[in-house]
Each structure stands twice: as structure tokens, then as C-alpha cells.
Image: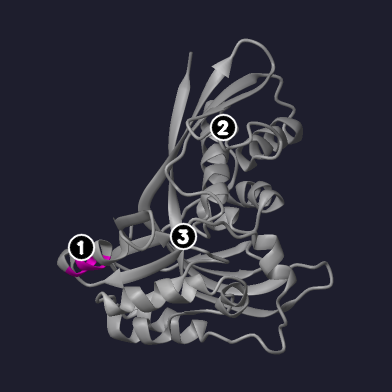
Amino acid sequence: MTSIIERAPAKINLGLDIIGKHEDGYHELSMIMISVDLNDYVTVSDLETDGIIMESNNHKMPLNARNDVFKAASLIKERYGIKKGVKIVLEKSIPICAGLGGGSTDAAATIRALNKLWELNLSKDEMIEIGFAIGSDVPYCLDAGCALITGKGEVVQCLNTHLSSWVVLVKPDFGISTRTIFSEIDCNTISRVDIEALKAAILAEDYKAMIEHMGNSLEDVTISRKPFIQKIKDKMMKCGADVALMSGSGPTVFALCPSEKRADRVVNGMRGFCKEVYKVRTI
């Protein structure tokens, strides 16, 4: 039996700007994302009978068409007329509904894995098309790394940088619905982020300038619903973080630290504040 294993790293948003809204309901985005070494793993294996069987170490995960991994497999089977069966095992480490792209990175890993397992030889554009049909972050997650994402999420420009930082992730004990947050956005009043300035700082590998230009337009909406997120940000800064910012639509807050010693200080300060605290690095 042939098996393929794909790593699925979490992401954080160094910058997220909402430019406007399209008539189809999608928002025009401008974001810079970077991967961190908190990983899920997707394993796909041949089945003798047709169908999709899914397993996970996380009992909260739906193992059917409500899961982005299952959606990706179903879409590929339908689109390319695959009559083979597949068993998918999803090993979760990334928190659920956390703003860290867990569902999207798992779907992207599934697309990559099935492309290899079934020898489909899909082009990058074909994989992006499949990914975007599942979610707007999936096209980025196909390659991950550091990238500028524009359009509705389907336009991905990799940024060539050796920028490296320690990252502390703090996930409060509640989740956030991305769909709910986006439905409450007022494009006329939401705060803006200068993504071009942030991009220039990243490409110049100017850490100080990057910190100054980081921001997340969605903080206005999410923090108004969950003020505890602001308390997390404030405490992380008091513990020595260079910057503390919500990732995606939240509720996870991440801090960047220039040294592991500083990161350890933030971790120690946050462990009595929230249960889920992770020390990772950008990749």
C-alpha cells in the first residue's frame, strides 16, 4: 500500500488589510503571511475500494464533507474522475478556529499529497483553482513560506526573505468564526494597514521597520466582540514582546521576539493567563 505524508504548517498574518468588497460577497484582500513551525500532518494511503475514509487524533474534527481535507479529496476525485479509494489520516497540532489557517493548510497538504499519490501531475494553477474552491487561504498554503496575498486570496506572490524570528502563540479558550467576522466588516470605517511599506521592510530584512508597519484590519471587529484579545496583546507587550498582533480573524495572538530568551520570558508570563501557549519559529 502506497502512503504519502505531507506537513501542514500553521501561518500568522504579519499584515492584513481589507481593501473593499466584491459584489459576490468576497472581500478584496492584501495580506502578508508567514509560516511557523507548528505543524499538522496529513497521510494519504490507497484503498482497495472506492471512497474516502478519514481519521484524526482530534475528536472535535468532523470526518466528513464538513472538513476541508475531505472537501479537497472529494473535489479532486470528482474533477479528475478518480475511481480509486483513499484513506486520510489527519494528525492535528494546530488549534481549531484559531486564525492560524489550520483547515486551509490541511486542505493544501491534502491536494499536494493526492497529486503525488494519484500521479495527477497537476500544474500550480490547477492546484490553486482547487484550493480556492475550498477556502481563500488555501492557495497560499500550497507553498506557504512568506508571501503577499492579494485579490480574494487566489493571487500569491512569494517574498524572498531570510527573515527569522521567535514567535509566541497564545490561543484563548474560545474560537472565532471567520465568516461571522467578515460579515461585520464596514469597509468605510475599518482601520487600514500599509501592506506595501510592510512588504518593502520584509524584503529589505529591516526588522524594526517591519514591526512598525505590521497590523491587522480585523482586530477592530474581533476585539469589539472579544475584548480579552486586547488583554492578551497588552500582557505580551509587558512581558517583553517586540509586537503583539492578532492572526487572521483571531482569536490567537502572536508575539515576535528577537531572541529565544525573550520568547521564553513571554511564554512564562502567558502560561498562567491562557492554557494554550506555543513557542515556535518562522519558517
- Whether residue 213 is in magenta: the answer is no
- Residue type (three-letter) at the residue carrying disc 3: Pro
Secondary structure type for disc 3: loop
Q: Position of residue 101 (x, y in %)?
A: 52, 55
- Residue type (three-letter) at the residue carrying disc 2: Leu
Residue shown at the point (72%, 89%) measured from the top left: 188
Residue 89 drawn above or below residue 210? above
Secondary structure type for disc 2: helix
Which residue sits furthest right?
A: 23
Q: Position of residue 117 (x, y in %)?
A: 53, 27
In this view of the protein, which residue sits in the foreground, 98 or 157?
Answer: 98
Q: Position of residue 95 (x, y in %)?
A: 47, 49
Q: Main secondary structure of the magenta part?
A: helix
Q: Earlier in the sequence, mark 2 or mark 3?
A: 2
Q: Quickly name the residue at label 2.
A: 114
Q: Quickly name the residue at label 1.
A: 264
Q: Position of residue 64 (x, y in %)?
A: 68, 32
Give the Cα separation between the discs numbered 2 and 3. 34 Å
Q: Earlier in the sequence, mark 3 or mark 1?
A: 3
- Residue type (three-letter) at the residue carrying disc 1: Asp
User: Residue 243, located in which quarter of the rendered image?
Assistant: bottom left
Per the rendered image, the range of residues in magenta is 262-266
User: Residue 136, located in which quarter of the rendered image?
Assistant: bottom right
Q: Are marks 2 and 1 in contact (CB under 8 Å)?
A: no
Give the Cα separation between the discs numbered 2 and 1. 39 Å
Residue shown at the point (57%, 50%) measured from the top left: 104
In this view of the protein, which residue sits in the foreground, 141 or 92?
Answer: 92
Mark 1 closeness class: few <14, some 14–19, many ≥20 residues within 10 Å: some
Give the Cα separation between the discs numbered 3 and 1. 19 Å
Disc number at residue 172?
A: 3
Mark 3 closeness class: few <14, some 14–19, many ≥20 residues within 10 Å: some
